[in-house]
Image: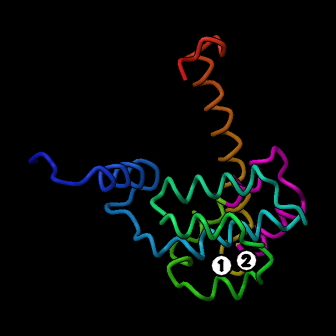
């Protein structure tokens, strides 16, 4: 296989989406608007969109290649839109429905609390996207295990948090 001619951004996105989602190519930046707004609406289901939740979504979308203009729009997006109307605007969101649910669990947990109303909204969205509740349960369990594993990784690689280089 020859050395790639891909640009820095292309390499970054190819790695991210191949490593974490098994994609052969990353989605286009235009795929992110409805996805990001849906995450924010779900995180706002408890009536308070915490800064940590919004910042998580901003960082996630920026890291996945979302355009700067979208990031700026999301900074002030009120996250009060009807979720069904929002999801109906992009058929590609349905193709990534399970990833959306998983990312919603992560975003809603970013403030340290997965509020019961946030979780209820996640289950509602999952139902609307034809995802069985058992799959949502599995995704929530997977998220919990992943957080625990990341904590173990940090402890093994940098046992003294005061001496982490970054």
Q: Main secondary structure of the magenta part?
A: helix
Q: Is residue 131 left or right of residue 119?
A: left
Question: What residue is at 38 percent from the left and 54 percent from the top?
Answer: 13
Residue plotted at (9% across, 47% down): 2
Spot the residue most to the left. Answer: 2
Give the image quarter of residue 21. Answer: bottom left
Q: Residue at x 85, y 68 (%)?
A: 45
Residue receiving disc 1? 130
Q: 143 or 79: nearer the eye?
A: 79
Residue 34 occupies which quadrant of the picture? Answer: bottom right
Can you say whether 140 is above or below 39 in the image? Answer: above
What SS does tag 1 mark? loop
Q: Which residues are magenta?
A: 104-125
Mark 2 element type:
helix
| Mark 2, residue position | 127
Q: Residue at x 63, y 70 (%)?
A: 73
Label 2: few (<14), some (14–19) or many (≥20) C-alpha neighbours in 10 Å: few
Q: In the visual, does 8 lie left or right of 13?
A: left
Instruction: Give coordinates of residue 120: x percent, y percent.
Output: 85, 67
Give the CA distance from mark 1 to mark 2: 5 Å
Instruction: Name the side, left or right, on which 70 lies relative to 6.
Output: right
For the residue pair 25 and 30, the one nearer the viewer reads as 30
In magenta stretch: residue 105: yes
Return the residue nearer the eye: 128 or 93: 93
**Residue 62 rendering spot, x and y as whole percentages:** 52, 57
- Tell me if label 1 and label 2 are in contact, CB under 8 Å: yes
| Percent coordinates x, y for residue 99 in the rendering | 57, 63
């Amino acid at each position: 296989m020859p050395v790639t001619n891909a640009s820095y951004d292309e390499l970054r996105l190819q790695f991210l989406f191949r490593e974490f989602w098994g994609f052969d190519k990353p989605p286009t930046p235009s795929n992110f608007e409805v996805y990001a707004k849906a995450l924010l609406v779900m995180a706002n289901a408890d009536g308070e969109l915490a800064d940590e939740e919004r910042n998580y979504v901003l960082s996630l979308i920026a890291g996945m290649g979302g355009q700067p203009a979208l990031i700026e729009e999301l900074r002030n997006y009120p996250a009060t839109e009807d979720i069904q109307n929002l999801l109906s605007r992009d058929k590609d969101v349905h193709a990534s429905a399970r990833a959306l649910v998983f990312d919603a669990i992560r975003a809603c947990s970013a403030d340290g609390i997965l509020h019961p109303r946030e979780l209820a909204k996640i289950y509602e969205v999952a139902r609307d996207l034809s995802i069985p509740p058992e799959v949502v349960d599995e995704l929530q369990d997977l998220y919990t295990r992943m957080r625990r594993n990341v904590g173990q990784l940090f402890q093994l690689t940098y046992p003294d948090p005061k001496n982490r280089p970054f």
